[in-house]
Amino acid sequence: MPLKITKVMSSHLIKYVRTIDVAFNPFDMRTRSARELLRQVNSERFQHANPKLKINPDIHSKPNAPLVKFAFVDGTDVSFDSREYLANEMLLDVWKTTMKMDDDFEMEGKNVDDM
C-alpha cells in the first residue's frame, strides 16, 4: 500500500521546507510537472502553515530543462529535473525527507517552529 500523506501531515511537514525554487519555460511541454508542483505549493494552506516559506518561481524563455529545488531548515537541499518526475513523485520524496527530519528533531528535542 502506498504512503498516504494527509492534509494535516503535509501542513506540518511543509514547516521543514525553507525555500522552493521552480524554474521552467511555460511554452515547453516538458514543464508540465514543474507547473503543477508550483500550483500545489502556492496553496494558502501551505502559506498559513509556514509563513517563512519562500517560493521563487523563475519563468523564462530559455530552452533549459525544468528544475525544482527544495531547501530545508537543516541546510540540505534536493533538486529535481522535473522532466523525469510527476509532481506527486517530487512531493512524495520531499515528504519522506521531511518525515525523517521530523523524527530526528523529535529525538533531539528540537522544535521546527524555533528554526
Image (cartoon, helix red, strand yellow):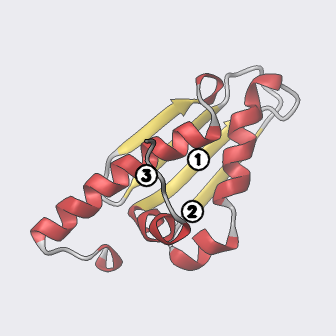
- Residue topped by disc 1: 21
Identity of the residue drawn at 70% across and 22% down: 64
Residue, far front: 1
Residue with the mark numbered 2: 54
Q: Residue at x 68, y 55 (%)?
A: 40
Q: Earlier in the sequence, mark 3 or mark 2?
A: 2
The image shows residue 112 at horizontal and vertical percentages of 31, 73
Q: Which residue is mark 3?
A: 95
In the image, taking residue 16 as reference, residue 24 lies left or right, namely right
Q: At x 83% / y 25%, what residue is drawn?
A: 28
Q: Position of residue 33 (x, y in %)?
A: 70, 36
Query: Quadrant of residue 48 in the image?
Result: bottom right
The reply to whether discs 3 and 2 touch (Cβ–Cβ < 8 Å) is no
Q: Position of residue 8 (x, y in %)?
A: 50, 72
Label 1 SS? strand
Amino acid on which disc 2 is placed: Lys
Q: Residues within 10 Å of mark 3 (few under 14, many from 20)?
A: many
Amino acid type, mark 1: Asp
Mark 1 Cα-neighbour bin, 10 Å: few <14, some 14–19, many ≥20: some
Q: Which mark is residue 67?
A: none
Q: CA distance from mark 3 to mark 2?
A: 17 Å
Q: x, y (%) of residue 94?
A: 44, 47
Closer to us: mark 1 or mark 3? 3
Inter-mark Cα distance, 1 to 3: 16 Å
Which label's residue is closer to the chain start, 2 or 1?
Answer: 1
In this orientation, does residue 51 appear?
no
Q: Quadrant of the N terminus?
A: top left
